[in-house]
Image (cartoon, rainbow, N blue to C red):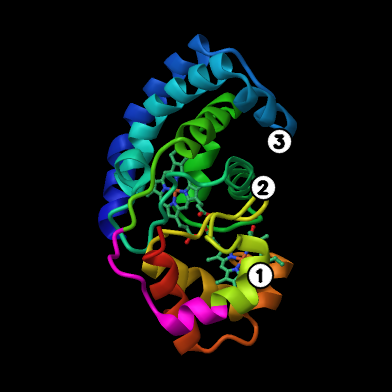
Amino acid sequence: MICLLHRLQATRAVLLSGLLGLLVAVPAFAQSVEELKVVLADAASRNTALEAGRKVASFCANCHGANGNSTQGDVPNLAAQNPIYLLNQINKFYTGERQDQWMEPVIRLLSETERLNLVAYYTFQRVTPVRAGTGSKTGHEVFLRVCARCHGPQGLGGERFPRLAGQQHDYIVKSLTRYRDRTGVRMEPEMLAMTAALSDAEIRALADYLSAMR
Ligand code: HEC
Ligand code: HEC
């Protein structure tokens, strides 16, 4: 993470100058879920947003990888993530409801339009799971029993529910452990309840299964 800090500092000036240009060039969209749906429903506005998002995403790529496929285990993939989930998380970083030393300052550098454009960009990228094989049998069993009713049997999620299929292994372990341990970083009630009874071994099994899921 130390190296990430250096990269963040080095790219902040570049980002700021790039963002000022985009602010002038792109029409403003208010940052509500309803407006996101409108932008995504229309092919022309979706493509405009996506292409504008691609430019800003070159900064995010320092940590989240090219096209939102992360190369660092504790940094999540953003590729193919569900748009409303992405927008909700960005808003949570913005307000501080979700805490992260990297993401809170990064998100506050962005305009509402840029945040929406980034969502449009990442939603339409493909995720390439880094793990081969079918993952853990125990993980599969726990997933179908406890998790699939919200995250879907294929791990693709839905409006409010994140895609988990192909997500980074270590990021899944980190996420599940801190919900279970109620660290305060992310206190979403449904996930606190769903993880309360998980053992460390089950968390690892779930991460093995989900990170290999295609
Ligand atoms: C300095 C590194 C760094 C940069 C630059 C960065 N991120 Fe992140 N991002 C992270 C880390 C680390 C996390 C995981 C935080 C956690 O543990 O909750 C994260 C998490 C996220 C999440 C939550 C994903 C999920 O599955 O819940 C979103 C959305 C996100 N970043 C978007 C962005 C966008 C958009 C940009 C560019 C404007 C960006 N990030 C730039 C490090 C970075
Ligand atoms: C009742 C619905 C529900 C169930 C069941 C559920 N989840 Fe979730 N899950 C959510 C919601 C809602 C979020 C977004 C939480 C937030 O904003 O912090 C989430 C977030 C997550 C995240 C964070 C993903 C990311 O990209 O940061 C992981 C990992 C996760 N769930 C895994 C699981 C696993 C594994 C199970 C089963 C043990 C499970 N969930 C069961 C609703 C559910």
Q: Which numbered circle lies on residue 33?
A: 3
- Check contact, mark 3 vs mark 2: CB within 8 A: no
Outermost residue, top direction? Answer: 25
Evaluate whether residue 57 shows in this view. Answer: yes
Image vertical order of residue 132 relative to residue 27, above or below? below
Q: Residues within 10 Å of mark 3 (few under 14, many from 20)?
A: some
Q: Which residues are magenta?
A: 130-142
Which residue is pictured at 49% across the width and 10% down the height? 25
Snapshot quadrant of residue 8:
top left
Q: Secondary structure at mark 1?
A: helix
- Asked if residue 110 lies in the magenta stretch, the reply is no
Image vertical order of residue 23 relative to residue 1, above or below? above
Distance from the alpha carbon under mark 3 to that under mark 1: 22 Å
Q: Secondary structure at mark 3?
A: helix
Q: Nearer the viewer, mark 2 or mark 1?
A: 2
Which residue is pictured at 53% across the width and 89% down the height? 199
| x then y, percent, for residue 60 | 38, 40
| x then y, percent, for residue 156 | 54, 54
User: In the rendered structure, which amino acid carries the disc numbered 2?
Assistant: Glu
Q: Which residue bears the numbered disc 1?
A: 191
Which residue is pictured at 41% across the width and 52% down the height? 77
Q: Does the beta carbon of the residue at mark 1 sit less than 8 Å from ligand 2?
A: yes
Q: Which residue bears the numbered disc 2?
A: 159
- The one nearer the camera, 126 or 5, is 126
Distance from the alpha carbon under mark 3 to that under mark 2: 10 Å
User: In the rendered structure, which amino acid carries the disc numbered 3?
Assistant: Val
Distance from the alpha carbon under mark 2 to that under mark 1: 16 Å
- The one nearer the camera, 59 or 173, is 173
